[in-house]
Image: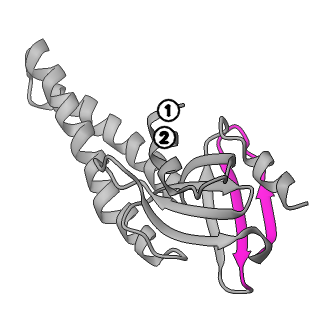
Amino acid sequence: MGRNESAASAYLEPGERTVVQLDGVVSGYTRWSGVGGLMGILLALAVPRALDLNFVLGVLSIVVVVTAVFLLVYYYVGRRLAARSTPPSQSPYVTVMLTDRRVLLLDRDLGADDPTLVEQTANENVSSVRHNRAGPLVPHRLEYVVDGGEPRKFEFPRSQPVAGFVAHFE
């Protein structure tokens, strides 16, 4: 069991078991993160040449620029997307945990040791589960509705077992 799995299991009730746990992001963050990452790398590689830095300072400047761009995308785009998502969260990083009784939505804020519970709902209150499979440049997309309200939309890397979540509701 990984760090996120053990931390998320703190929200389980006695006798409840995890069916599938998915670590992903709010809808739209994958695209912004990818574009920001590409721009960050290009900028980071241009800085040492533009400033004519020696090898050690060049490597250090690359690390600083890539980190700065990551933090800019996280704080200025990711947190805004998370605040506008349904339900709102603090961070674009989320864990969707399906148990034999409930669906738990956890916020995995950057630097936080334990995820924060954002929403929990009984499995029978979840409807309209939709899944778009991942492609070479597109993440898994999962959408589900709770109690007939606004859809919850998330994106997951190819390695996440999203089909297991969907199969539970078929």
Is residue 27 visible in the rendered image? The answer is no
- 10 Å crowding of disc 2: few (<14), some (14-19), many (20+): few
Tell me if residue 140 comes above or below residue 154 in the rendering: above
Going 75% across and 68% down the picture, which residue do you hit?
Answer: 123
Please give the name of the residue rendered at 51% of the width and 57% of the height, measured from the top-left corner. Answer: 11
Q: Which residues are magenta?
A: 126-147
Measured as percent of width and height from the top left, residue 134 is found at 72, 44
The quarter of the picture where residue 13 lies is bottom right
Pointer 1 and pointer 2: residues touching (CB < 8 Å)? Answer: yes
Magenta stretch: helix, strand or loop mostly: strand
Q: How is the image coloured?
A: one colour
Distance, label 1 to label 2, CA atoms, is 6 Å
8 on left or right of 79: right
Q: 60 left or right of 143?
A: left
Q: Where is residue 2 drawn, in percent x and y?
A: 50, 32
Circle 2 sits in a helix, a strand or a loop, which is it? helix
Residue placed most toward the observer, 76 or 170: 170
Quadrant for the N terminus in the image? top right
Q: Amino acid at mark 2?
A: Ser
The quarter in which the C terminus is drawn is bottom right
Counting from the top left corner in percent of width and height, residue 9 is at: 53, 48
Magenta segment includes 157: no
- Secondary structure, mark 1, is loop
Which numbered disc covers residue 2? 1
Which residue corresponds to the image point at 41% horizontal and 40% vertical from the top-left?
38
Q: Classify residue 45 by image quadrant.
A: top left
Provide the residue designation for mark 2: 6
Q: Is residue 129 above or below residue 159?
A: below
Q: Is residue 160 above or below residue 140?
A: above
Q: Nearer the viewer, residue 169 or 26?
A: 169
Residue 135 image point, x, y percent:
73, 42
* Residue 24 as seen in the image, left or right of residue 160: left
